[in-house]
Amino acid sequence: MRPNVFTEAGISTRLNQWWSSIPFVTSGVILICGVIYLVCLLTGYDSFEEICFLPSKVASHFQVYRFYTSVVFHGSLLHVLFNMLALVPLGTELERIMGSVRLLFLMFLLATTNAIFHLIIAFLVAYNPLYHVPFIVDECSIGFSGVIFSMIVIETSLSGVQSRSVFGLFNVPAKWYAWILLVLFQFLASNVSLLGHLCGILSGFAYTYGLFNYLLPGPSFYSSIEGLSVLSVCVRRPGFILCTGGTTYGQLPTYSNTSSTPSALINGNFLRNISSWMPSRQTTTTTTQEQDPRFPGRARTLGSAGTEPTAREASANLHASLLDNTTPSDPLTSSQNPAANTIRADATVAADQVDTFDEELKKLVGMGFEKTQAEVALAAADGDPNVAIEILMSQQG
């Protein structure tokens, strides 16, 4: 009996550790969807036509609430279980990168754009002049999978991997990963919304390539939300991740944002704008460090040359160059200019962080992991090599 006690304690401890590692918004969405499903199950509620996304009802009665009620309701235990298990790794990684409030806004934005795409495409297909398909506007869609498909596109674009494993059976090019999942789910599962998943992929690519930039608020918006007194209890939660003031390790290299401004859609070359919808990666580097509104952090293209200094090294070099212009030997100048002392301390801390990060990165590379994937995993783990190893092992698995 004694070994069984130890086994049960170990399982419960592992479950607690697993749940505590999930950030605030991701775990909150899981709880909301799970509780809604349990309430529907216990009360016998099955009138999904009242809350599902139904293009005909949205258009005729302007029932916009269906944009969001359809996302949190699920039709079966496997439906909600599969969606939430898929949300855990995606939401955890994106929330660590973006912050809790920013990820919550992203989910709201994706749910809205998915529904708009779904509505437009449904009516275009239903009443096209070649062949009418009127039943498509009367299809009822529920579930979080549309948002999950959008997050798959965003996370895949951000991770920088060249290939992805499909259920551990075979590898496919990363840029086709979401499309292959779309086709496989249509063949492997029944009652799957092809249009709902397709619109999720389209929203993911539109977000990744900056087509929603004009809809994204600035950092001050997220800071003001985090500073609300009514949310102070949530902000103090261990799993809540602030959008600003995070650690350096939480800032990942991202796509450049030099060609994704909203005006480029109108003033730029039309063919170039259309080609931006295709799932192709950008490999050009940037000479200026701008903060990408889609992916917070210092902008550095994934897959850049190894001889190019990283964003953290560039920041440390900037602090060092500022120190070179000061005169520390003059005690009067040093006492009259406390900002120089502050810059000196910041430069020392930044240099130490760069050294620590590089040392841990070298250890991961020495263990046989690919350098780009190791850097992304170590950054997502806030510099913790143990968590980074778990992320890398899960990706390989």
Image: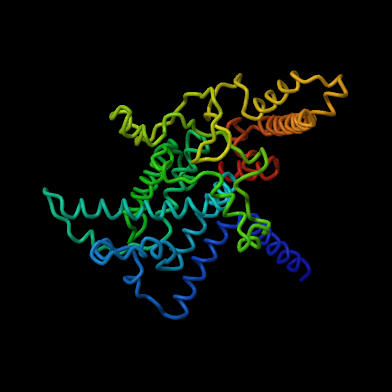
Instruction: Name the residue: 12% across, 51% down.
Output: 131
> How far across and down, in percent of the image, does residue 19 sit?
63, 59
Compare residues 326 and 76 and report the one nearer the observer: 326
Examine the image and state in which quarter residue 188 appears.
bottom left
Does 228 appear above or below 268? below
Does 166 appear above or below 59? above
- The color scheme shown is rainbow
> How far across and down, in percent of the image, does residue 168 sit?
49, 45
Compare residues 42 and 348 and report the one nearer the observer: 348
Does 38 appear above or below 86? below
Count up the numbered dots.
Answer: 0
Decide if residue 218 is on the left or right side of residue 278.
Answer: right
> How far across and down, in percent of the image, does residue 27 sit?
57, 60
Q: Dividing the image into 4 quarters, which one contains the N terminus?
A: bottom right
> How far across and down, in percent of the image, does residue 251 sit?
61, 38
Examine the image and state in which quarter residue 209 appears.
top left
- For this orientation, the residue located farthest to the left is 130
Compare residues 221 and 372 and report the one nearer the observer: 221
Instruction: Name the residue: 21% across, 54% down.
Output: 123
- For this orientation, the residue located farthest to the bottom is 43
Q: Dividing the image into 4 quarters, which one contains the C terminus?
A: top right
